[in-house]
Amino acid sequence: MLAVLAQLQIGCSDSGVDPGGDMQAEKGYATGVVRDGSGKALPGVRIIVDNSIFFNSNITTYTNNEGKYKVRVPNGSWYAFATHNVSYNNENYSFYLHPDNAAGFGGEGGERNFVWRLSGVAPQPLSGHYGGLVTFDNFPGVYIEPAGIEFELTPQGKLVDGSTGTVIRRRGDNSYELSDIPIGRYKLKARYEGKPVKFRRWNSDEEFRDEFDLVFKPQIAAQCDNCAMLEYYWQP
């Protein structure tokens, strides 16, 4: 899961630049094109040009109908970011998009293109993964090795970007989580030592189920973003 750079969301100024025309690199401007994983242009994506030295000093603009943007940058040290807000499954999600060049630039400007990736490692100065996070904890009194649980996640319908997902079979990344799962709806099943593991939402009194409907939340307060938190139960 990405570590959200909260300072990018406040104290920004709107560039007011019309990103029409050709978005070729131009001195003194940050320019680029934003696309989804299939190559389709993404309009309305927020571009944040963040000063790497002065806190809370940012410039913002949005992509046009062709997924292009252009914003003037003054002298300084800058990084460009792109955030995409999406309505999916009656929830509103926010995603950082992947740059073709994560390096900073100065007042000369630079070309920074972005693509929406549902998984993968985010480059610095971001951190974490583009995919969602699933955490799991044991029901009191259930003592098994969580890293030995074999998970199977079967997509139910399209993923958040409208693409078709594939079945994911994995063991836990560590004792407590599965990371970098493309955001979507899944049917979750798992086994430990050949027997089913049952799940329910963390911190709930719901019934444990051996076929669990996994839904990611845009945010679980004070816990995580683009994530699901579960509790498991197993009987030998």
Image (tube, helix red, strand yellow):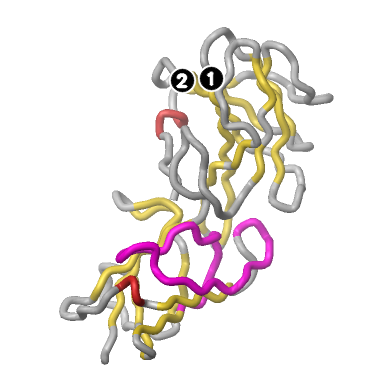
Magenta stretch bounds: 160-188
Give the SS element for disc 1. strand
Q: Amino acid at mark 1?
A: Trp
* Numbered tag placed on residue 10 in the rendering: none
**Label 1 Cα crowd, 10 Å radius (few <14 / some 14-19 / many 20+):** many
Q: Can residue 164 be found in the magenta stretch?
A: yes
* Numbered tag placed on residue 78 in the rendering: 1
**Comes first in the chain, label 1 or label 2:** 2
> In percent of the image, x 55 and y 60: which residue is there?
182
Give the SS element for disc 2. loop
* x and y percentages locating residue 29 in the rendered image: 68, 16
Q: Quadrant of residue 6?
A: top left
Classify residue 28 as left or right of residue 150: right
Q: Amino acid at mark 2?
A: Ser
Q: Residue furthest left?
A: 141
The residue identified by callout 2 is 52
* x and y percentages locating residue 190 in the rendered image: 42, 81
**Label 2 Cα crowd, 10 Å radius (few <14 / some 14-19 / many 20+):** some
Tags 1 and 2 touching, CB below 8 Å: yes
Q: Can residue 195 be found in the magenta stretch?
A: no
In front of the other: 117 or 215: 117
Q: Is residue 196 above or below residue 3?
A: below
Q: Is residue 203 above or below residue 194?
A: above
> In percent of the image, x 65 and y 38: which residue is there?
114
In front of the other: 82 or 93: 82
> In percent of the image, x 41 and y 42: which residue is there?
3
Q: Quadrant of residue 98?
A: top right
